[in-house]
Image: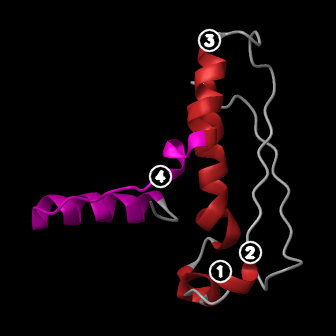
Amino acid sequence: MATTIEDCDRMIEAEKESGKIVQIGMTGRFHPAVRKAREILDSNELGPVVTALSQFNKNWGYAGRRYQYRSRWMGGGMWLGNGVHAVDWLTYCIGSKAVSVKVRQSTSMHYQ
């Protein structure tokens, strides 16, 4: 939503003042593979989830042309632009929040 709590608060206040709706787009939840994973995990046929891993790859040949990936002033980089979706998919599929998180990201294909 934003890079700081203060910015989130300002967005919420602006929403209230403007009468407009702020929308957060976690559309990956509707991908067929994510929905199927949730269905399997909800069925408990695999037993309880004790650990989970998400890997997110990006085609920088295309994505690198988009303004949000070229502009350093936008902030957040790969984590805010894509990492949040990986975490959202995992927490959605598992049906609970993470207890512990470890992240490793690479900038080998992009300046960030």
Chosen colour scheme: secondary structure
Residue 106 on image: x %, y %: 86, 68
Q: Amino acid at mark 4?
A: Thr
For marks 4 and 1, give the CA distance. 17 Å
* 101 to 83, vertically: above or below: above
Q: Which residue is mark 4?
A: 27
For marks 3 and 2, give the CA distance. 34 Å
Tag 4 secondary structure: helix
Q: Main secondary structure of the magenta part?
A: helix
Would you say residue 2 sits in the magenta stretch?
A: no
Tag 3 secondary structure: helix
Q: Amino acid at mark 2?
A: Asn
For marks 2 and 4, give the CA distance. 18 Å
Residue 22 as seen in the image, left or right of residue 76: left
Residue 4 on image: x %, y %: 49, 62
Q: Earlier in the sequence, mark 1 or mark 3?
A: 3
Q: What residue is at 44 percent from the left and 60 percent from the top? A: 1
Q: Which residue is mark 2?
A: 59
* 12 to 95, vertically: above or below: below
Residue 84 as seen in the image, left or right of residue 9: right
Q: Which residue is mark 1?
A: 63
Q: Which residues are magenta?
A: 5-32
Q: Which residue is mark 3?
A: 43
